[in-house]
Amino acid sequence: NKFVTEAHFSGYAEALQKTVTPKDQLARTHPAFAIYVYAQNQMSVMAEQLLQLAEMKSFAKQIGPAEDEYAPSWPPMSPISTSLFTCWSTFDLGIGARRESLGDVIIAVASEYGTHDSMLTLMRTLQDSRMGIYRVQERDGTRVQLQDLGADHSFKAVCTSGYSGSTGELWYTRVLPPPQPGADHVIFTSPY
């Protein structure tokens, strides 16, 4: 029954919205980071709903066991941070011949249902991101100068994890481009 399914998902979506990072907490963090957190939270709400569908069983078969095995949190409980696992399961895990990710599916559904263009842009930026290895060149509070060893270029980025590292240190992390002109790059996952 289509009505029951829509009503079920509507109630589920409302409950999931209560799990997103509260606006007052977002207001206390760096604005460039907060923008991406909000977009990723909305993608997570959609992911939780989509993963309930039979058509998404290929994703659920991969994500569920990986989540059970790695129990993402942070050491000492697990070597895998929640941010790393969430990004891997949403943006990096490819399924099928086209290696489609959960993020690709979310963006297609969001686009079909009229999600605002600026939100779709943020979602696509998250989807197009990658984990990389970066060298810390300079530190200044929550800002660091990083050298992307894969692309051999440097840039300033905001790191809100509370860890600014030391000069020369290598980080394995996901760095996002500035979400708006004049903003810093954003270190989105906790650096390893």
Image (cartoon, helix red, strand yellow):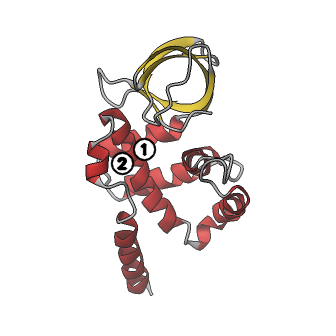
Kindly identify the amino acid type of the residue bearing the numbered disc 1: Met
Dot 2 corresponds to which residue?
38
Report the quarter where the C terminus lies: top right
Residue 152: where, in percent of width, then height? 60, 12
Q: Nearer the viewer, residue 118 or 2?
A: 118
Kindly identify the amino acid type of the residue bearing the numbered disc 2: Tyr
Relative placement, left or right, of 134 versus 47 is right
Q: Secondary structure at mark 1?
A: helix
Residue 48: where, in percent of width, then height? 50, 65
Dot 1 corresponds to which residue?
123
Q: Secondary structure at mark 2?
A: helix
Q: Nearer the viewer, residue 184 or 116?
A: 184
Q: Nearer the viewer, mark 2 or mark 1?
A: 2
* Mark 2 to mark 1 CA distance (whole Å): 10 Å
Q: Nearer the viewer, residue 23 or 95?
A: 23
Which residue is rendered at x = 39% and y = 41% of the image? 36
Residue 169: where, in percent of width, then height? 62, 19
Relative placement, left or right, of 65 versus 139 is right
Image quarter for residue 68? bottom right
Residue 95: where, in percent of width, then height? 68, 53
Q: Is residue 113 above or below residue 172?
A: below
